[in-house]
Amino acid sequence: MSGFEHYEHELQELDHEIRRYAVVCHVDLANRYEIDACLHDDHLSWAEDRARESLRGLLILRIKLEAEMIELGFSPAPLLPYTPEQ
């Protein structure tokens, strides 16, 4: 166990930080391609782009937390609430 005793609260705090950094980095969390690019694209200027590197780390942490929650039988809430397309 990772030490997360209150999964729901930890997930909410993590999501809050992810949303904050996404705004700073102009990453649309509803756009899967932008999230994938943030997670997988290497940039030569990462040292200069600390906000984007922080967002990348937070997204990776969320994925790990989700995996741990699922393994323990919890159902993690989605990062963004489902909104049907109109």
Image (cartoon, helix red, strand yellow):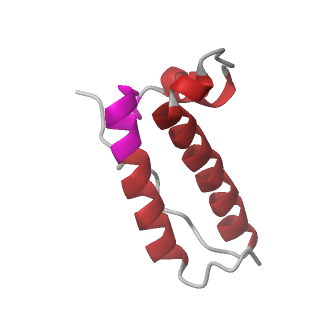
The residue positioned 51% from the left and 34% from the top of the image is: 50
Q: Is residue 56 above or below residue 25?
A: below
Q: Is residue 37 above or below residue 72?
A: above
Task: Judge from the rendering whether residue 30 lies leftward or rightward of residue 40; answer left or right.
Answer: left
Q: Nearer the viewer, residue 69 or 22?
A: 22
Quadrant occupied by the C terminus: top left
Task: Judge from the rendering whether residue 49 lies leftward or rightward of residue 20; answer left or right.
Answer: right
Name the outermost residue toward the front.
Answer: 48
Residue 48 image offset from top left, x and y in percent: 53, 24
Q: How many marks?
A: 0
Q: Is residue 34 above or below residue 65?
A: above
Q: Nearer the viewer, residue 12 or 71?
A: 12
The answer to if 28 sits in the magenta stretch is: yes
Name the outermost residue toward the top.
Answer: 44
Quadrant occupied by the N terminus: bottom right
The quadrant where residue 15 appears = bottom left
Q: Nearer the viewer, residue 1 or 47?
A: 47
Q: Is residue 20 above or below residue 32?
A: below
Q: Which region shows up in magenta?
A: 20-30
Residue 61 image offset from top left, x and y in percent: 63, 54
The residue positioned 51% from the left and 27% from the top of the image is: 49
The residue positioned 41% from the left and 65% from the top of the image is: 12
Task: Judge from the rendering whether residue 75 lies leftward or rightward of residue 86; answer left or right.
Answer: right
The residue positioned 60% from the left and 85% from the top of the image is: 5
Residue 39 image offset from top left, x and y in percent: 63, 31
Residue 23 image offset from top left, x and y in percent: 32, 35
